[in-house]
Amino acid sequence: MKIEVDKLVPKMPNLYELLGEAIEYGLRRGWSRAHKHDDKPTEELIFDTIPKCIMEEIFERFELIQSECEEKPIRLEP
């Protein structure tokens, strides 16, 4: 059986799976980072570190584009 490369259509990635993976890795990395230099980090440090790491993981996997019509910066808040 010969596969005709011209007729192959790329499949959309599973965005739900990719986003879930990014969140899980970011959560784990944030928890580890918060505990890196302190065995008992403050709640504030943990709550600050985890969302940053989650967003870093998301930005590694997805390119977020701001609309040219909009002048406001993109705000991603928990």
Image: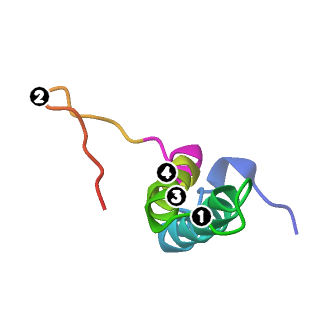
Depth check, mark 2 against mark 3: the one in front is 3
Dot 2 alpha-carbon crowd within 10 angstroms: few under 14, some 14 to 19, many 20 or more? few
Depth check, mark 1 against mark 4: the one in front is 1
Mark 3 and mark 4: Cα distance apart in space: 5 Å
Depth check, mark 2 against mark 1: the one in front is 1
Q: Are circles 1 and 4 on residues that touch, CB within 8 Å?
A: no
Q: Between 25 and 37, which is closer to the camera in this rendering?
A: 37
What amino acid type should be assigned to the residue bearing mark 1? Answer: Pro
The label shown at residue 69 is 2
Dot 1 alpha-carbon crowd within 10 angstroms: few under 14, some 14 to 19, many 20 or more? some
Dot 3 alpha-carbon crowd within 10 angstroms: few under 14, some 14 to 19, many 20 or more? many
Instruction: Name the spot of residue 69 as percent of width and height, x first.
Output: 11, 28
- Nearer-N-terminus badge (1/4): 1
What amino acid type should be assigned to the residue bearing mark 2? Answer: Cys
Identify the residue position indicated by label 1 in the image: 41
SS class of the residue under badge 1? loop
Quadrant of the drawing holding the N terminus? bottom right
**Hey, which residue is sitting farthest right in the picture?**
1
Q: Between 9 and 30, which is closer to the camera in this rendering?
A: 30
Task: Find residue 4 and report its image quarter.
Answer: bottom right
60 inside magenta stretch: yes
Identify the residue position indicated by label 3 in the image: 54
SS class of the residue under badge 3? helix
Instruction: Name the spot of residue 40 as percent of width and height, x first.
Output: 64, 69
What amino acid type should be assigned to the residue bearing mark 3? Answer: Ile
SS class of the residue under badge 4? helix
What amino acid type should be assigned to the residue bearing mark 4? Answer: Lys
Region in magenta: 58-63
